[in-house]
């Protein structure tokens, strides 16, 4: 049985509340990014969905943090730092679902202004987070835009 946390701690961001809703045998898990990051509106999607079979689908995530003005902003440092923060956001959603990065089976990565240099920078941050763990399957594609005018967005699929 899947245990959904009532709240989780996110390194560098603090405690975040977790809400769950059940629908059609699935659990929809939503982290309160609005209060944590200062997002001025409710996001039109949940953070993750857990199926009866234990598959977790994590929504697209970006490398956001709360700025000095209290509003959300992309972490400084380009694709490398954004990849690190993006994976930390994915990790937070997984944690709320009772899972971790070790459960990830697939990552979809989107990179703005895709070039060899930016791809290598994103991969440097990606490898830093994964460390010595086995890497999941992954696809990376170029895109014109991700949220908050960032450079990197990722989503993930995991299996409990």
Image (spheres, helix red, strand yellow):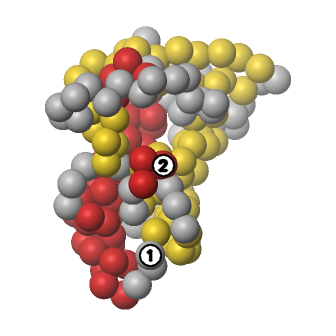
Is residue 97 toward the left or the right of residue 73 in the image?
Answer: right
Q: Earlier in the sequence, mark 2 or mark 1?
A: 1
Query: Residue placed at 51% from the left, 65% from the top?
Result: 110
Q: Is residue 101 visible?
A: no
**Residue receiving disc 2:** 147
SS for dot 2: helix
In terms of secondary structure, where does tag 1 sit? loop
Quarter residue 84 falls in: bottom left
Instruction: Give the Cα separation between the discs numbered 2 and 1.
Output: 14 Å
Residue 40's place in the image compared with 112, above or below, is above
Name the residue located 48 percent from the left edge and 49 percent from the top edge. Answer: 147
129 left or right of 95 in image: left
Q: Give the residue drawn at x 20%, y 61%.
A: 77
Residue 53 rendering spot, x and y as whole percentages: 69, 37
Q: Quadrant of the C terminus?
A: top right
Residue identified by numbered label 1: 113
């Amino acid at each position: 049985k899947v245990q959904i946390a009532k709240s989780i701690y996110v390194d560098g961001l603090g405690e975040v509340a977790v809400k769950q809703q059940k629908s059609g045998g699935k659990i929809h898990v939503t982290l309160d990014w609005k209060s944590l990051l200062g997002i001025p509106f409710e996001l039109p999607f949940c953070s993750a969905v857990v199926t009866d079979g234990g598959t977790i689908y994590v929504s697209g995530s970006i490398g956001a943090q709360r700025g000095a003005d209290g509003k959300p902003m992309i972490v400084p440092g380009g694709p490398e730092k954004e990849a690190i923060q993006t994976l930390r956001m994915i990790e937070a959603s997984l944690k709320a679902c009772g899972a971790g990065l070790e459960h990830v089976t697939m990552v979809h990565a989107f990179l703005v202004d895709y070039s060899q240099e930016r791809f290598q920078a994103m991969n440097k941050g990606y490898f830093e987070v994964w460390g010595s763990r086995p890497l999941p399957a992954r696809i990376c594609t170029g895109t014109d835009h991700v949220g908050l005018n960032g450079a990197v967005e990722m989503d993930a699929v995991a299996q409990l």
